Image: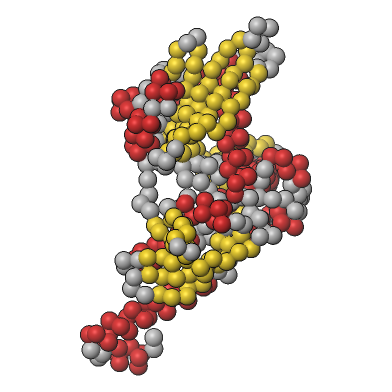
Amino acid sequence: MNRINAIKFMHCPKLIKATCLILCIFLALSSSFNVIGQTIYGSHQVFTVAKIYVDVTAKTASAARRKALAKGEREAFYVLLKRLTLRIDHDRLPVLDAKQISAYVQDFGVTNEKNSRIRYLADLTYRFKPNDVRLLLRDSEVQFAETISKPILVLPVYQLAGAAFLWDNPNPWREAWVGNPKTIKTRIQRRVVGLVPMVFGNGDLTDIATISAELAVKGDMQSLLAIAKKYQVAASLVVLANLRSTPQGLTVLKVRVSKYDRHASRQVFSMLIKAKKMESVGVLLRRSAKEVITRIEELWKVDNLLKFENIGVITVTLPINSLAEWVDVRRRLVKVAVVESAELVIFSRKEVRLNIHFIGEHDQLKLALAQLDMNLMEEEGSWILRTQKPN
């Protein structure tokens, strides 16, 4: 708004001034929202790889740092590619040299840096260029997913000789997931490495009073919903591990993963993992935990692979009670990986109508929207988009 128009606006009657203000806000929002469509997707969190530890020795401190940064960069790059893709495709990932990998780095950060005359140690965090990484995978014909699920609460229950352990100390199965109980702090334990963020309970007195190992194994819905509510998650996973020996004397771990939310409960999968020769129980449990995590994330990726051959458009109506609601939905839509763009069609005091261009099928769009507390439903032949309160 230039200076002359600003002066005129200041002298408008109140009603006209309010109308002008709404129009200005509307034009600003609609314009900025169309710009969003020019980026392929909006969720960049997944393209950040943190806690890459390097420890490199060279002839000089500067040489050690250069080698460490190059090493960390390469490691972070392939951590990212494996995070986005299915394990079956990891052998088909593009192989790049150091210079090529550097072209995909947006920026990086360094913490816990230590160095001597010949040695360099640090924890590195890299942020990669989302669109460039996507184009690389597409050109390599490797399918990938980038929708991040809502956090889930993991309850590792350990069964041994007829007894079940959850919050007990020791519970070596929980330690395999969370770490040594001596290092567990009172804050919520989180794992945000892949596309499925995982939350682990503190094991405090409230947790112990809310759900026991026996209730978790039985799938007591009241207790499971209560513990999920405490940690503000939509679902809980009871990961039951039963350690036993076969008649041949082999140690095996049977793992059963069951999911519980306010809508339903179901067994997700089960696995039987055999101990390797001379492998201790602790190592077996840690290896099994990693395998279960990989399986959980693989199932999520399969449901959320970006299918570029299927490009769709859907007209949705968003009921609103205030301008703030629309601004909030616009902010959420930017983060939805399968949404390619969104065109504002109608804007009124009570509703917004959008054309959402998306990749994949309707069910995939609904699943992606649900991760950001948006519910897409078909009602009487029309698609309605409603926001939900976060869990």
Q: Position of residue 112 (x, y in %)?
A: 51, 40
The residue drawn where x is 74% and y is 47% is 93
Image position of 186 (left or right of 137): left
Q: Position of residue 346 (x, y in %)?
A: 43, 75
Q: Nearer the viewer, residue 71 or 352?
A: 352
The residue drawn where x is 38% and y is 70% is 351
Image position of 80 (left or right of 32): right
Q: Is residue 215 above or below residue 260?
A: above
The residue drawn where x is 51% and y is 54% is 366
Q: Residue furthest front?
A: 380
Image position of 172 (left or right of 247): left
The residue drawn where x is 30% and y is 83% is 19
Instruction: Residue 118: name its quadrant.
Output: top right
Instruction: Residue 128: name its quadrant.
Output: bottom right
Q: Residue furthest left?
A: 14
Q: Position of residue 376 (x, y in %)?
A: 46, 57
Judge whether residue 199 can be spotted in this image.
no
